[in-house]
Amino acid sequence: MQVHLAAEREHRINRFKQPVRLLDPEVRASPVLVTELLDPEFTEFGASGRRWDATSILTVTSAGSVDPESPVKVSEMSGVVLAPGVVHLTYFADNNGRRAWRSSLWRLTEAGWRIYFHQATSTN
């Protein structure tokens, strides 16, 4: 039973591509697409130390915060299913030399997977 549950969790996490989608320049340039990925109660503590909510993130992402010519490089992604419909993801991101460990909580809603909480810790 434990092996089956572990395999099922791994399969679900491997299929979970939302964080990478959220870093896509085309997605970030579209408030509609970003809104589809943000939980209404979204909160972020950025690498800068600033606290963000859904409204403030939409302002930044709409302003072209990811260069289409140099997309964010993501590596070392790993995830854990904390409870049914709740996933904790961690990954390393390099945005033109601005490097940070990132951690996010995603929850499954009627509208699909949405990011509920995110935190970045700068490594620069």
Image: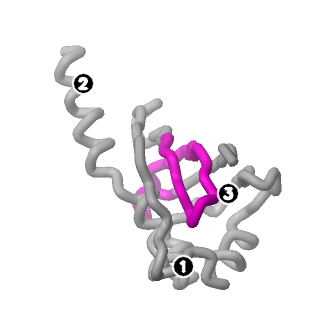
Say which of 77 and 88 sits in front: 77
**Residue behind mark 2:** 5
Report helix, strand or loop for mark 3: strand
Kindly identify the amino acid type of the residue bearing the numbered disc 3.
Answer: Glu
Residue 116 highlighted magenta (yes or no): no
Q: Which-is-in-front pick, marks 2 and 1? A: 1
- In the rendered image of this protein, does residue 34 appear above or below residue 4? below
In-image side of 70 versus 51 (left or right): left
**How far apart are labels 1 and 3 at the CA level?**
27 Å
Report helix, strand or loop for mark 1: loop
Dot 2 or dot 3, earlier in sequence: 2
**Residue behind mark 1:** 67
x 41%, y 59%: residue = 18
In-image side of 58 versus 89 (left or right): right
Report helix, strand or loop for mark 2: helix
Span shown in magenta: 90-114
- In the rendered image of this protein, does residue 3 appear above or below residue 52? above
Q: Position of residue 57 (x, y in %)?
A: 69, 69
x 42%, y 60%: residue = 20
Figure label count: 3
**Residue behind mark 3:** 41
Residue 95 highlighted magenta (yes or no): yes
- Quarter residue 78 falls in: top left
Tell me if label 2 and label 1 are in contact, CB under 8 Å.
no
Q: Which-is-in-front pick, marks 1 and 3? A: 1
- Quarter residue 14 falls in: top left
x 23%, y 40%: residue = 11
**How far apart are labels 2 and 1 at the CA level?**
39 Å
In-image side of 107 versus 49 (left or right): left
Kindly identify the amino acid type of the residue bearing the numbered disc 1.
Answer: Asp
Tell me if label 1 and label 3 are in contact, CB under 8 Å.
no
Dot 1 or dot 3, earlier in sequence: 3
